[in-house]
Amino acid sequence: MNEFTGYKELGLVNSRDLFAKAVSGGYAIPAYNFNNLEQLQAIVMACVETASPVILQVSKGARSYANQTLLRHLAAGAVEYAAELGCEIPIVLHLDHGDSFELCKDCIETGFSSVMIDGSHLSYEDNVALTRKVVEYAHQHDVTVEGELGVLAGIEDDVHAATHTYTEPDQVEDFVGKTGVDSLAIAIGTSHGAFKFKPGEEHSIRLDILAEIEKRIPGFPIVLHGASSVPQELVQMINAHGGKLKDAIGIGEDQLREAARSAVCKINIDSDGRLAMTAAIRKVLDEKPEEFDPRKYLGPARDALKQLYMHKIVNVLGSNGKA
């Protein structure tokens, strides 16, 4: 059994104050997933240079890939690294798509300051009961909790869903009241992965549903998952250097900016980061087939990721200068 490590010992913060400021300020906090050192370096550098708060997201798959102990120390290192770079930005360590009470509890006990419990695949009653159980435990340790209503289609890590179920505005007030969650992930047409739409399909998300939800729970922090825009220049770069990404299409950045101006205060972006890194790595390996030093292709990948995330912070989320 691990000894309890509280997130405050690591210099982390929970999301409560960050969300309150984001809702009143009309911007969203970036929630960036990381699995390794280069991703973390890029995230911290991008957020320090733009003076943005950040949510470092770890999925169940990332925890298994990178090891929970290493990830915890990396997150603590990120706090010190930001200070070293000259800006002590608020950093949240968040479990993305927790699928059980046990996993959420384990993360809370090993330094996470925020957890998501995703009961969206369960019946409404079971989702409420599971979410409430996580909230009761998390709040004892001042850890914030994100719940989910509605189902996002697509595939990302351990999250798979063939079909999309929009969040029912009629349910949100009841769900928030019964569970005590601090934020709510909703389904309004975003989806996981890089293949969100088929060619010829309407690419818009249901901002009308978002507006209706906002009316039911005014000022309550809303979260958008699956919000990568899948920049076509990255898709083309990957394919030009030996990749085979056919018909990868994402969410328009203008729509995400509109959502961020309303109650959406956390936007998850993962696939765009994967594309940026993969494009940079493929380019180096294609143009310099003699290269075998990982730093020579992971370095450019890290730099590409940093530039992408700075763009998202300034032009999509509006969180620059909010640290």
Image (cartoon, grey):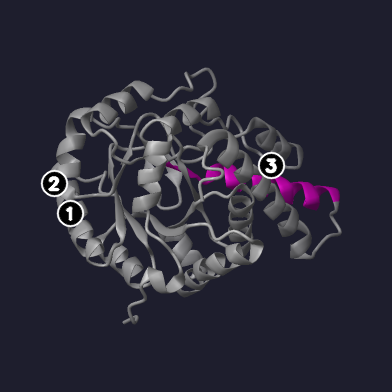
> In the image, is residue 43 above or below residue 315?
below
Describe the element under mark 2 as helix, strand or loop: helix
Kindly tell me whether residue 115 is visible in this rendering: yes
Q: How far apart are labels 2 and 3 at the CA level?
A: 47 Å
Mark 1: amino acid? Arg
Tell me whether the residue at label 2 lies in contact with that at label 3, contact meaning CB atoms closer than 8 angstroms. no
User: Magenta span covers which residues?
Assistant: 266-287
- Residue for badge 1: 132
Between 29 and 276, the one nearer to me in the picture: 29
Describe the element under mark 3 as helix, strand or loop: loop
- Residue for badge 2: 178
- Residue for badge 3: 243
Q: How far apart are labels 1 and 3 at the CA level?
A: 44 Å
Main secondary structure of the magenta stretch: helix
| Quadrant in which the N terminus appears | bottom left
Q: Within 10 angstroms of label 3, few (less than 14), some, or many (20 or more) residues?
A: some
